[in-house]
Every structure is written in structure tokens, then in C-alpha cells.
Image (cartoon, rainbow, N blue to C red):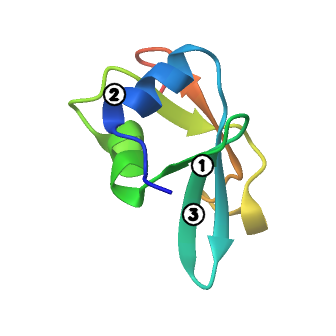
Amino acid sequence: MASLSLAQAQARLERGDTLRMELRNGSRLWWFEAPLAHVSGKIASALLFGARSPVRIMEAGDSLFGLPLNSQTWLPCEPGEH
């Protein structure tokens, strides 16, 4: 299955979809549920850190092992909230 583009991922977040992350074999896997759509690490990083993304994400608070940037659930955030 191909990964979503940045614009497609932004559209899903704007609709209220939740981005999920799982650690597997030392790598982060990102996806949206219902309908299932994979998100590459590059796109997830753009949503988290990228200046070119008007839609940004933040952790929902269910961090794996209590470490920052290891949340299993990522939500869109308001400008300045990131």
C-alpha cells in the first residue's frame, strides 16, 4: 500500500482523523484507521516539525514508555499550540 502525500495526510487531520504510531523493530510506523492509510516517516516528520505544513500534530498523551515523541496517538493542533 502506498503512503499518503503530505496534502492527503493534512486533509485527513483536518477532517478530524487521528494519526497512529507504533514502534516495530526499532522503527516508527504511522497510519490512519478507517479507511486504513499508511503515512511515511518523512510525512509524519513534516506534520510534526515542518514549516511547510499548515496542519501540525501533537501527542495525545499515551506515550510509549513515558518518553516524549513516542505517543501512540497524534492529533491536529492549533497554531501556536505545538
Disc ID at residue 29: 3
Going 73% across and 55% down the picture, which residue do you hit?
63
Q: Which residue is mark 2?
A: 7
- At label 3, which amino acid type do we have? Leu
In the image shown, does 66 or 1 lie closer to the viewer?
1
Going 54% across and 24% down the picture, which residue do you hit?
13
Camera sees residue 69: no
**How far is disc 2 from disc 3 in space, using C-alphas?**
19 Å
Instruction: Evaluate if marks 2 and 1 touch, with contact meaning CB atoms under 8 Å apart.
Output: no
Q: Is residue 25 above or below residue 14?
A: below
Camera sees residue 7: yes
To which quarter of the image does residue 6 belong? top left
- At label 1, which amino acid type do we have? Trp
Query: Crowding at label 1, few (<14), some or many (≥20) Cα neighbours within 10 Å?
Result: many
Give the image location of residue 38, x and y in percent: 53, 51
Query: Which element type, helix, strand or loop, lies under badge 3?
Result: strand
- At label 2, which amino acid type do we have? Ala
Q: Is residue 79 above or below residue 33?
A: above
Going 41% across and 18% down the picture, which residue do you hit?
80
Q: Earlier in the sequence, mark 2 or mark 3?
A: 2
Q: Which residue is mark 1?
A: 31
Q: Earlier in the sequence, mark 2 or mark 1?
A: 2
Instruction: Evaluate if marks 3 and 1 touch, with contact meaning CB atoms under 8 Å apart.
Output: yes
In the image shown, does 80 or 34 lie closer to the viewer?
34
